[in-house]
Image (cartoon, helix red, strand yellow):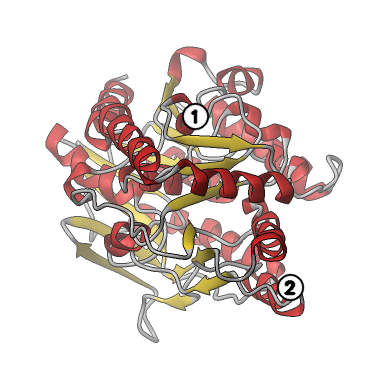
Amino acid sequence: MNCWWVNHYACSLDEPGGTRHHTLARLLGDHGIDVTLLASSFHYSLLKDRLDPGEDWRVEMRDGVRYAWLRTRAYAENPIAKLRNMRSFAARLPGFASMDKIPSPDVIVGSSPHLYAADAARRLAAGMQVPFCCEIRDIWPESIVDVAGVSRWNPAVLHMGILERRIYRAASCIFTLLPGSEQHIVAKGGLRDAITWIPNGIDPQHVPAPHPPPGEAPFTAMYAGAHGLANGLECVVEAGRILQDDTGADAFRIRLVGDGPLKVSLQNHARMKAIEVVEFDDPVPKKDIYATLQEADACLLPLKPGRVFRYGISPNKMFDYMAAGRPVITAVDTPVNPVVDSGAGVSVAAGDPQALAAALIDMKALGREERVAMGERGRAAVLNQFNMGVLAERVAEALHGAAAG
């Protein structure tokens, strides 16, 4: 069976960014499904194109996974330019219906880092007369209303609401990363029996043996991921200021690894407030992330306050932290928290730098032995419950069912 999986932001292992679909594509091959990942040629965090000048598209194999890169508009930090990039990908995607360089699909999956791409995948599937499935990564447009503060009556939000309902209603199967999202999806037109919970997870093949934390001063906490609006990193920088004021500049170090639209403003804020305990590091490829994480004593998972997180959370970074064997401090308002549920760390209120600073002081005071035990519990949880090999089996079953139906 052939599957086209559309994810505007798909990344291979030698690049920074989310590699969920790379791993799924490789593992689905063990279940008789040949996956082609259809993605934008423009890398969303490196801000550079994978294609050479004059190329409109390219099909290539990376680490055993087939990618079809589609040229889309470049952008820098301008949100309007980023929106145009999304729209250009969605506008050009249906042209792949005539693509003869990749196996014709028996099913098409549209992932929703944004709805324009998922809806374009729906249109592509309809044009090719094959079943359409969707993957819900975030609840759009509720996320931008709740977290970004955009008006519910904004024309773009209203349009996204139409797309959301259209996508759910057209989908033969619906993969959701959020364990509490079923009621919302059904209310918007999705079929309850079509929904399958497929969280993010880890690929044991790429998880190295655990290494003990460095155990050297200063106590190092690390965040590794996007520096965007939803990530709540302003809270982390302010927590660094509080720690510096209360304990001095040598007791703690907070490393923010990654890139994104808010990185420059966060750096400027730290510079203006002379916050020395916060460091900003470049993003690293997924293949190097565990070695980087194991340079930390603990890891940080902040998110902005928002009701949308009542559906649950499933960021890649959380599972990477746990797989690396490091205790995790989450600062997110959610009733479903794998870190807390597995005993792999603690949680504080989102958007509260004082609480986050206190949690870091408490984590340091726990001592090395208890922190190692937390890390071991987290690692065991992801290997048992969030193993991509097991998750791929569930995806394969749903896709075979959709194709047969």
The image quarter containing residue 398 is: top left
Q: What residue sits 69% from the left and 67% below the top?
A: 79
* Residue 212 falls left or right of residue 194: left
The image quarter containing residue 61 is: bottom left
- Using the numbered discs, state the Cα–Cα distance from disc 1 to disc 2 in whole angstroms: 31 Å
What is the tally of numbered marks visible in this picture? Answer: 2
The image quarter containing residue 174 is: top left
Q: What residue sits 38% from the left and 36% below the top?
A: 374
**Residue 195 to residue 123: above or below:** above
Please state which of residues 338 and 193 is positioned toward the viewer in this rendering: 338
Mark nearer the N terminus (1 vs 2)? 2
Quadrant into which the C terminus falls: top left
Asked whether the residues under the numbered discs 1 and 2 touch, taking CB atoms below 8 Å apart as contact, a structural biologist would say: no
Residue 119 screen position, x and y as percent: 55, 43
Residue 140 screen position, x and y as percent: 65, 40
For this orientation, the residue located farthest to the bottom is 53
Residue 151 screen position, x and y as percent: 85, 45
Residue 182 visible, this angle:
yes
For disc 2, the marked residue is: 269
Q: Which mark is residue 340?
A: 1
Q: Secondary structure at mark 1?
A: helix
Q: What residue sits 66% from the left and 67% below the top?
A: 262
Residue 302 screen position, x and y as percent: 60, 48
Q: Amino acid at mark 2?
A: His
* Residue 130 falls left or right of residue 111: left
Q: Which mark is residue 192?
A: none
Q: What residue sits 33% from the left and 54% below the top?
A: 213
